[in-house]
């Protein structure tokens, strides 16, 4: 079963009875063709470029609605055409019948008659006009019968009408001159064999060999044969028209199939293009997300660099105030620094508001900030951060002011190498190398 039978399976119930099986089948084919064409156009419209493109289901519903409407319009238009043709044909038939009815009986001119008159013993011969007669035109009568509502019955009644007129003397002389079979011999639409038979009847009628009662019978027979021949010719013509319409329909269906195939190819290409666009958009979004992550990590590294630089300044201040042990300080200075870094010393410093204690607290508070910046710079999660022993060791050493100044800087340099930009590490290494060269001692 094809797609047209699935989408438009039913024809109106009146179609077969009103048009006949062949005509109904042909009209149903045209209706399906129109429905499929409108369905294809609806799908094309739904798949075309638009600000808001409808979904595939909505496009199918629009296309099917247009197809069903076109399918019904074909039957409605055919009914309107049949009704209009019937009215026009009936008007023409009525007008022809009115024209023929007024010319069936015609008046014939009178023939001059001779007369003899005697006067004074002399005989004079002259002519005098006579009144004309009425004459029935059998050809017009047959044509009028053929235009009636029931041509076959009217043709059968023609012989009775002619015979009745003969009996009342309406056409005494005229009918002998008018051959009733000439209507058949002069009709070029009749088959040659039927016209040959009518010609023989006409010759027999003209020579008086065909009696009046046989004339009517032969006219009836010829009328029935002419009716059958006309019906057969019309049937043949109708079959030829139907064959041509079938060929036209097949051609239209091929064109429609090509159109639908092209539409399907266009839709498939549009789907491929859409998937390509979606994939490209996804790749673009992924690339942007990756770039955003890279930018975020770079920003975190810059912030880590800034925080480590500030942390170094805190240690420099603490060293300057004598609050941290250092290889650059004397033994006395280191003993005092160690004492101030003890629990008792820090308690006293906190009580009196010592600047060294303030720097120690600031350094210790930097630890969670460094931890968060390292997390952002590396993309590690909390579990990965906790399991990274090396990072935890450097982080504690970098934020423990109880260690030596050099140990803190070295831990900061390692953090910068692993997770930062490396700028602070270079500065610290340069400073520590200078210190070792000057003091001749290790950083510890």
Image: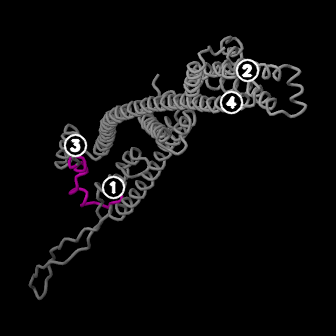
Q: Which residues are magenta?
A: 168-186
Q: Secondary structure at mark 1?
A: helix
Closer to the chain start, of discs 1 and 2, is: 1
Closer to the chain start, of discs 2 and 3, is: 3
Number of residue marks: 4
Closer to the chain start, of discs 3 and 1, is: 1
Q: Which residue is more in the foreground, 19 or 204?
A: 19
Q: Position of residue 134 (x, y in %)?
A: 30, 65
Q: Crowdedness of circle 4 by 10 Å Cα count: few (<14), some, many (20+)?
A: some
Q: Secondary structure at mark 2?
A: loop
- Marker disc for residue 316: 4
Q: Nearer the viewer, mark 3 or mark 4?
A: 4
Q: Nearer the viewer, mark 4 or mark 2?
A: 2
Look at mark 2 in the image and give the residue it sits on.
Answer: 325
Q: Nearer the viewer, mark 1 or mark 2?
A: 2
Q: Crowdedness of circle 1 by 10 Å Cα count: few (<14), some, many (20+)?
A: many
Q: Which residue is more in the foreground, 444 or 151?
A: 444
Q: Position of residue 226 (x, y in %)?
A: 30, 41
Closer to the chain start, of discs 1 and 4, is: 1
Residue visible at 26% across and 71% down?
132
Q: Crowdedness of circle 2 by 10 Å Cα count: few (<14), some, many (20+)?
A: many
Look at mark 1 in the image and give the residue it sits on.
Answer: 141
Q: Position of residue 320 (x, y in %)?
A: 71, 31
Look at mark 3 in the image and give the residue it sits on.
Answer: 198
Q: Position of residue 384 (x, y in %)?
A: 67, 14
Q: Are marks 1 and 2 in contact (CB under 8 Å)?
A: no
């Amino acid at each position: 079963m094809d797609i047209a039978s699935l989408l438009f399976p039913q024809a109106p119930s009146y179609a077969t009875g009103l048009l006949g099986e062949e005509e109904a089948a042909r009209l149903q084919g045209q209706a399906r063709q129109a429905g499929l064409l409108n369905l294809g156009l609806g799908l094309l419209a739904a798949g075309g470029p638009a600000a808001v493109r409808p979904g595939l289901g909505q496009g199918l519903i629009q296309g099917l609605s247009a197809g069903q409407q076109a399918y019904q319009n074909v039957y409605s238009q055919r009914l309107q055409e049949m009704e209009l043709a019937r009215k026009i044909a009936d008007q023409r038939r009525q007008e022809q019948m009115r024209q023929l009815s007024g010319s069936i009986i015609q008046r014939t001119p009178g023939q001059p008659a001779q007369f003899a008159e005697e006067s004074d013993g002399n005989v004079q011969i002259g002519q005098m006009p006579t009144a004309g007669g009425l004459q029935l035109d059998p050809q017009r009568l047959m044509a009028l019968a053929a235009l009636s509502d029931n041509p076959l019955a009217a043709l059968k009644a023609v012989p009775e009408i002619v015979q009745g007129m003969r009996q009342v003397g309406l056409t005494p002389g005229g009918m002998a001159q008018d051959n009733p079979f000439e209507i058949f011999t002069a009709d070029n639409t009749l088959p040659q064999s039927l016209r040959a038979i009518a010609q023989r009847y006409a010759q027999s009628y003209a020579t008086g060999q065909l009696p009046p009662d046989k004339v009517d019978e032969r006219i009836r027979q010829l009328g029935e044969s002419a009716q059958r021949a006309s019906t057969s010719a019309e049937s043949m013509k109708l079959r030829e028209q139907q064959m041509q319409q079938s060929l036209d329909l097949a051609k239209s269906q091929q064109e429609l199939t090509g159109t639908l195939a092209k539409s399907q190819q266009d839709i498939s290409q549009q789907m491929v293009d859409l998937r390509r666009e979606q994939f490209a958009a996804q790749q673009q979004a992924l690339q942007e997300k990756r770039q955003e992550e890279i930018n975020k990590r770079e920003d975190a590294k810059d912030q880590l660099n800034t925080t480590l630089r500030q942390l170094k300044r805190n240690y420099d201040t603490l060293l300057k105030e004598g609050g941290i042990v250092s290889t650059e300080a004397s033994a006395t200075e280191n003993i005092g620094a160690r004492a101030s870094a003890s629990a008792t010393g820090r308690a006293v410093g906190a009580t009196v508001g010592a600047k060294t204690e303030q720097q120690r607290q600031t350094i210790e508070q930097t630890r969670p900030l460094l931890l968060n910046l390292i997390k952002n710079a590396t993309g590690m999660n909390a579990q990965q951060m906790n399991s990274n022993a090396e990072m935890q060791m450097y982080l504690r050493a970098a934020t423990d002011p109880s260690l030596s100044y050099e140990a803190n800087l070295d831990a900061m340099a390692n953090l910068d190498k692993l997770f930062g930009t490396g700028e602070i590490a270079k500065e610290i290494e340069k400073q520590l190398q200078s210190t070792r060269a000057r003091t001749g001692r290790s950083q510890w």
